[in-house]
Image: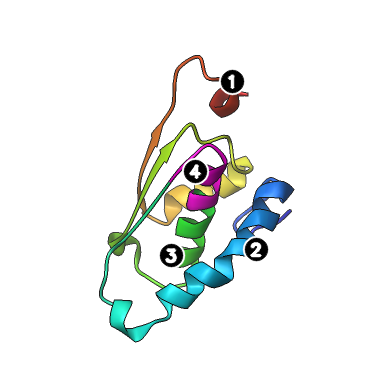
Amino acid sequence: TDFIGMGEVNKYFHKAHDHLWPSVLGYLARPEFQDYKITFTGHSLGAALASLAAAATVHQCYRPAATVVLYTFGQPRTGSYKYAMTFDGLGIKSYRVVFSDGIIPHG
């Protein structure tokens, strides 16, 4: 399904993001946290969700890309080529750690 105009993402990841996003957004909107840098991180499914949260944070202008960092471990392919290219275009510093023989990240 389309993820906020950025391209297609796995519908399961999208649904999980939609379920968790209001909690994240609650903290992003709090005035006392406006000047904080944000690090998103996760493993496997959590990595896919961290990627979507980082993308939404910057794409929807909750924070500038210079204040967002993403670290993922064993992240599966989260979305389509268009999503990946749009994500890269956001300018978020991101680090994706995968095992070369891992079936989830490379499947």
Q: Amino acid at mark 2?
A: His
Taking depth in this image into account, of 67 and 15 the one nearest to the observer is 15
Q: Residues within 10 Å of mark 1 (few under 14, many from 20)?
A: few
Residue beneath disc 2: 19
Residue 34: x %, y % from top left: 31, 78
17, above or below 72, in the image: below
Taking depth in this image into account, of 87 and 28 the one nearest to the observer is 28
Q: Amino acid at mark 1?
A: Ile
Q: Quadrant of residue 61?
A: bottom left
Q: Quadrant of residue 29?
A: bottom left
Q: Residues within 10 Å of mark 3 (few under 14, many from 20)?
A: some
The boundaries of the magenta stretch are 42-50
Residue beneath disc 1: 103
Going from N to C along the chain, the mark reached first, 3 or 1, is 3
Q: Residue furthest bottom?
A: 31
34 relative to 45 in the view: left or right: left
Q: Residue furthest top?
A: 101
Label 2 secondary element: helix
Residue 30: x %, y % from top left: 39, 82
Going from N to C along the chain, the mark reached first, 2 or 1, is 2
Asked if labels 1 and 3 touch by Cβ distance under 8 angstroms, the answer is no
Q: Amino acid at mark 3?
A: Val
Asked if labels 3 and 2 touch by Cβ distance under 8 angstroms, the answer is no
**What is the C-alpha distance between the residues marked 3 and 1?**
30 Å
Residue beneath disc 4: 47
Label 4 secondary element: helix
